[in-house]
Image: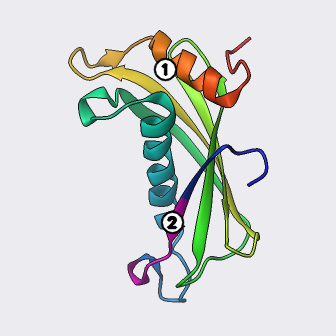
Amino acid sequence: MDGYRYVYTQEVAFRDLDAFGHVNNGVYLTYVENARIGYARDVIGIDSLEGLLMIVASVKIDFRSRANLGDTLEIGARTTRVGTKSFDLEHEIRAQDGRLVAECQSTLVAFDYDADETMPIPPEWREQIENYESRSAAAT
């Protein structure tokens, strides 16, 4: 996928379909979540639930074409901004034929569950993201 180093592969399952036989709009959040967790594990280095110190603050999805049973989808994930306490991820979802299925943007906030409050982005997250993305994603 052009512009995405991190790509998560997702096969459309029967349970993902709505009454019209294509992927239900709500299921795309799960697809994006799977890619986000993979990115957190493989890029940021988070290897446990205890280390997953982030919450989703915002998600926007634009649907471009439908996905169907048996499609193998590629979900690209990349960080477009790293702020003080939050960062933005951008996603493209494409079918195996290269067709754009959906585009998504999300904002994630670093969150200390023990203190029940936001926290600064850990320096190691910032470093891992910037090294992986091969550019500075720091907010200006």
**Quadrant of the image containing the C terminus:** top right
Choose the circle earlier in sequence order: 1 or 2: 2
Identify the residue shown where x is 38% and y is 80%: 15
Identify the residue shown where x is 67% and y is 30%: 133
What amino acid is labelled 1 in the image? Trp
* Residue 16: quadrant of the picture: bottom left
Q: Which mark is residue 10?
A: 2
Q: Which residue is mark 1?
A: 125
What amino acid is labelled 2 in the image? Gln
Identify the residue shown where x is 58% and y is 73%: 72
Q: Which mark is residue 111?
A: none
Query: Which type of secondary structure does the marked residue at label 2 adopt?
Result: strand
**Above or below 4: residue 53:** above
Does residue 121 appear in this view? no
Query: Which type of secondary structure does the marked residue at label 1 adopt?
Result: helix
What is the span of residues highlighted in magenta in the rendered image? 9-15
Identify the residue shown where x is 23% and y is 14%: 115
**Above or below 107: residue 67:** below
Closer to the camera in the image, 47 or 121: 47
Question: Counting other residues with Cα less than 10 Å from the Cα at mark 2, is it few (<14), some (14-19), or many (20 or more)?
Answer: some
Residue 97, x across and y down, in percent: 74, 76
**Quadrant of the image containing the N terminus:** bottom right
Residue 84, x across and y down, in percent: 55, 11
